[in-house]
Image (tube, rainbow, N blue to C red):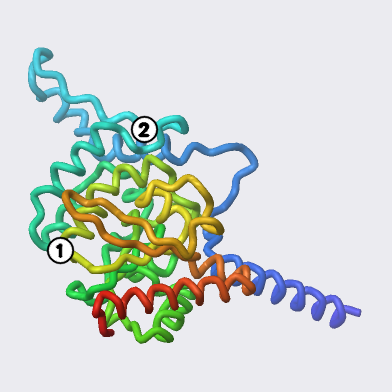
Amino acid sequence: MIQDDRNVLESDAKSLIAALEWQVEMGADDAVFDQPFDRYAHQAAKAAARSAPPVEASRRAAAPSQPAPAPRAAPTANAPLGTAEAVSEGKSLASQCTTLEELRAALEAFDGCQLKFDAKNLVFGDGNPDADIMVIGEAPGRDEDIQGLPFVGVSGQLLDRMLSHIGLTRDSFYITNTVYWRPAGNRTPNDGEFAVCRPFVEKHIELVNPKLLLLVGGRAVTSLAGVTQGITKSRGKWYDISVGDQAFPAMATFHPAYLLRNGPAKRFAWRDLLALKRRMREEGITP
């Protein structure tokens, strides 16, 4: 009887461990509390605590006529992160960059996006910066956050396989995202986060200067192409993405993470890639 109970316990433990490993693999690495927990306020409090001077130092601080500047207000649900101040700061920093190395350094110094303080790494870009094809996704995931590279997880591996069938490898395309840090819990970035990162994305496109763009996922299409319809209606279509005085042709398609959950949609994504291949021929692009 005791042995039977022990076998049951061991079986239950293995099942629980397997379930936990599956959830982690799917990106569910944040605990959900019984009561709502304001992570933005928590991070703002931690940042304020780190920047606060010691008590004795504060007593020797400047006179009352020179008060310390107030910390930036924590984002709210109505105005998530896209404050005019952060967007303006991003535009100023991005406009000064003349190389991808300078753009990366500017992003590393930029504190206007709250996503940065919850992420492990900046996820900038990967592939060939001199390529004629530039792929832009939505946001880094768990694996991307760990490695600091875009599209390296399961969905990224699927995207690589799909593009290989039209002759493209990471030696012949460049890839990045519309935001540069992983949203906690793999959630979809909000409008404010897109707005704050957009000046850097536009400068990213300008510096790579591709002939064609591939927009991967609904939020990448809505944030860059400005369409309001969902990805099922916008996919397979060409849009012009205006950056400065240039217009970059962009094809919209499904995100590979969506295709992993919805196998039948892969045939539509394949049609999109064939349309991209035809356009590559017209533009004289050879992988």
Q: Secondary structure at mark 2?
A: loop
Return the mark for residue 91.
Answer: none
Check disc 2 and give the amino acid type: Ala
Query: Is 155 on the left or on the right of 59, as rendered?
Result: right
Crowd rating for badge 1 (residues with CA inside 10 Å; few <14, some 14–19, many 20+)? some
Residue closer to the observer: 178 or 279: 279
Query: Is 50 on the left or on the right of 92, as rendered?
Result: right
| In contact (CB < 8 Å): disc 1 and disc 2 | no
Crowd rating for badge 2 (residues with CA inside 10 Å; few <14, some 14–19, many 20+)? some
Q: Position of residue 29 (x, y in %)?
A: 52, 60
Query: Is 96 on the left or on the right of 40, as rendered?
Result: left
Q: Which residue is mark 1?
A: 100
Q: CA distance from mark 1 to mark 2?
A: 30 Å
Q: Which residue is mark 2?
A: 74
Q: Position of residue 163 (x, y in %)?
A: 40, 80
Q: Secondary structure at mark 1?
A: helix
Q: Quadrant of the C terminus?
A: bottom left
Check disc 1 and give the amino acid type: Leu
Residue at figure coordinates x 53%, y 38% from the top left: 37
Residue closer to the observer: 259 or 183: 259
Does 186 sit above or below residue 164?
above
Which residue is situated farthest in the right direction here? 1
Q: Position of residue 87 (x, y in %)?
A: 25, 38
Which residue is situated farthest in the top direction here? 65
Please identify, in this view, whether the residue under mark 1 or under mark 2 is nearer the observer: 1
